[in-house]
Amino acid sequence: MGAEGPAGVALMARAIQLAERGLYTTDPNPRVGCVLARDGRIVGEGWHRRAGEPHAERLAIDAAGESARGATAYVTLEPCCHHGRTPPCTDALLAAGVSRVVVGMEDPNPLVHGRGLERMRAAGVEVVTGVLEDACRALNPGFDKRMRLGLPFVRLKLAASLDGRTALANGESQWITSEAARTDVQWLRARSSAIVTGIGTLLADDPSLNVRLAPAAIPALEEGEPVRQPLRVILDSALRLPLSAKMLSLRGATLVATREQDPRRIAAVTSAGAEVWVGPSTTAGRLDLEALLRYLAAREINEVLIEAGPTLAGALVQQRLVDELVLYLAPHLMGTDARGLFDLGPLTSMSERVSLERLDLRRIGPDLRIRARFVDEVG
Ligand code: AOF
Ligand code: ZN
């Protein structure tokens, strides 16, 4: 810990802005920004763009050149001290002669986790931590949770009418929300490492579950680079996936999570272009959702977007596996027998209510968007 005056805090705010440029491209790496300043004046800036490419600190040092000597580095994440795809940033900062390092948060990666800061201190560099920590942490909810708990950050996206209905009793459901809300969802997809849905939704809608934003809409992409497609994950206990499902012919990978072990069925789905993961069952004989999330985290999946019907949404909420709810509400009333958002079963006492907090409300075109955190989220 240590104090940082308003000028320093403003420089960290700038580093956060830089880190945000990597929102759609750094996966599975964290989004990181770095500002080098001397006497309060910025002499170099950098942000991490893509795994395998240089880290934020390296780019800021290169931009500053000789001016890095004696400068203060403002970094949203603790500088790494390990050899990953790229060499340690601690060594680069020391070689460049940086004399102070101000960081937003420790790197939760067990390979770093405080050791980067220790190394800088041991070399006589003044280290200040925890500056705009909450905002720095918010850059990487998935990376942070995966590194700490071996689970991805789970965001549940739902759309309903103002009376909380998602489909008519006869199942008719498409186009509840506006075009503007659906574009907003495209940005949620674009930042996610994986999009999860259930086989019920797939059989009903044959969805694409892909990102359809133009590459030019994502400034971090260079000329000719395609938009990153999140892994599509289908929960399909009995392996009912039709081999003609639209998403199998789209760019990006599809993973089918199942309990079905029949090698012929698995081979058929595999040859149609999807990967099959045979997961464990719960005592209730359902696919173990937590085991699936742990498996995804082990595959470096940081942020998961769930786009599902009331059965899967209810099961995930009941098992406390969801971190964030993003709910779009369209200004319609859909009537008594229409389907609800979550199958949670009837509660018998108010103490069983599921609570949310930190509500954020915005208008998206003609619709409302509510974002909120589940109170007893795991992470
Ligand atoms: C930093 N600055 O800009 C980033 C950091 O495989 P590598 O070499 O890219 O290393 C990835 C790890 O480095 C990642 O898991 C995280 O711990 C850290 N990311 N560190 O000092 C950066 N992107
Ligand atoms: Zn680094």
Image (tube, rainbow, N blue to C red):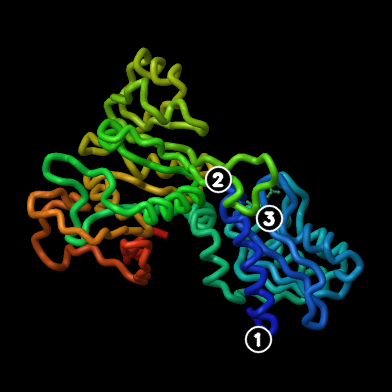
Q: Secondary structure at mark 2?
A: loop
Q: Position of residue 112 (x, y in %)?
A: 66, 57
Image position of 104 with respect to 238: above or below: below
Q: Quadrant of the C terminus?
A: bottom left
Residue at the extreme right of the image, as rendered: 66
- Left or right of 131? Residue 245 is left
Judge whether residue 376 can be spotted in this image.
no
Which residue appears at 8% of the width and 54% of the height?
Answer: 336
Q: Which residue is mark 2?
A: 214
Task: Residue 211 in the image: state x and y as whole percent.
Answer: 48, 43
Residue 206, which numbered label?
none
Count the marks.
3
Q: Where is residue 210, by image quadrant?
A: top left
Q: Earlier in the sequence, mark 2 or mark 1?
A: 1
Q: Residue at x 50, y 48 (%)?
A: 190
Q: Which residue is mark 3?
A: 48
Q: Quadrant of residue 241?
A: top left
Asked which quadrant contains residue 172, the reply is top left
